[in-house]
Amino acid sequence: MRFSVSPRFIGAILAVFVRLWYMTLRVERINTKVFTDPELRAKRPVVVLWHDEIFPLIPAHAGERMAGVVSQSKDGEILTGVLQNFGFLAVRGSSSRGGMRALIAAKRVMDEHGVGIIFTVDGPRGPRHKVKPGAVFLANHAGSPIVPVRAVMSRAKIFHRAWDKFQLPWPFSKCTIIYGDPILLPDLGDDPEEMQRQCEHLEQIMNSLGNNL
């Protein structure tokens, strides 16, 4: 007899692991007031991360009424289980599968629940640390500010074979979470060149966060 374990169940188990692991970290936050500002949260910000830094950022923001855009892959199903166990809503889709459908669903969740949206802007398949247009497109059409967030880990296991070189911070290491200032986009209309310029600008800002640590 074969037994199958659902990805959501695996996600729930992983959430316990993530929670316990996170408790061992020494977490410092920089520019937190930006992220916790009630006026900003009321504008339903689009919060952008790098894919390889997601591990400490999920438990760090547990229960903060946000929604995450998650790939439609099996791994995405597992991540959905993790996110839901930390109190996040999940919107399924990505830039490679169901992209526009995911953006429409994300906008609907923002409107119906009054929450911000979290994007791993180089996911789900890379290239690593290259901003894709989904988050910029959504922020433009929702009239929302973009908030870049980085997690800088003092010591981490880096999975070099993974496309994103995923980082798992070692227990008892230091993790610094840096919140960038909100980015207010001009009206981009349907200009693909301006969209690309804004993606490149966001990429520069993301890469600059944490340089002084």
Image (cartoon, rainbow, N blue to C red):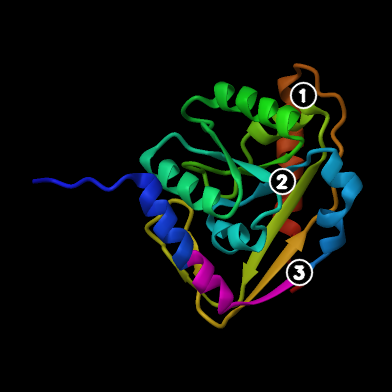
Q: Amino acid at mark 3?
A: Arg
22 vs 48: above or below: below
Asked if the stretch drawn in magenta spans residue 190, the answer is no
Whether 20 is among the magenta residues is yes
Quadrant assignment for the C terminus: bottom right
Asked where in the image residue 175 lies, by quadrant, the reply is bottom right
Residue at 76%, 19% in the rendered image: 191
Tag 1's secondary structure? helix
Q: Which residue is mark 3?
A: 29
Q: Residue 122, relative to residue 178: is it above or below?
A: above
Count residues near mark 1 (Cα–Cα under 10 Å), then give few for <14, some for 14-19, many for 20+: few
Task: Find residue 47 and name its label.
Answer: 2
Circle 2 crowding by C-alpha within 10 Å: few under 14, some 14–19, many from 20: many
Q: Which residues are magenta?
A: 18-28
Near-viewer residue (91 or 166): 91
Q: Which residue is mark 1?
A: 141
Residue at position x 78%, y 27% in the image: 142
Residue 97 position within the rendered picture, expressed as x and y whole percent measured from the top left:
46, 28
Q: Residue furthest left?
A: 1
Is residue 72 among what the camera can see?
yes
Hey, what amino acid is under mark 1? His
Instruction: Specify the amino acid type for callout 2.
Output: Val
Rendered image quadrant of residue 13: bottom left
Image coordinates of residue 113 in percent, x first then y, are: 72, 34
Neighbour tally class for label 3: few under 14, some 14-19, many 20 plus, Cα within 10 Å: few
Look at the numbered disc 3 and give the secondary structure of its residue: strand
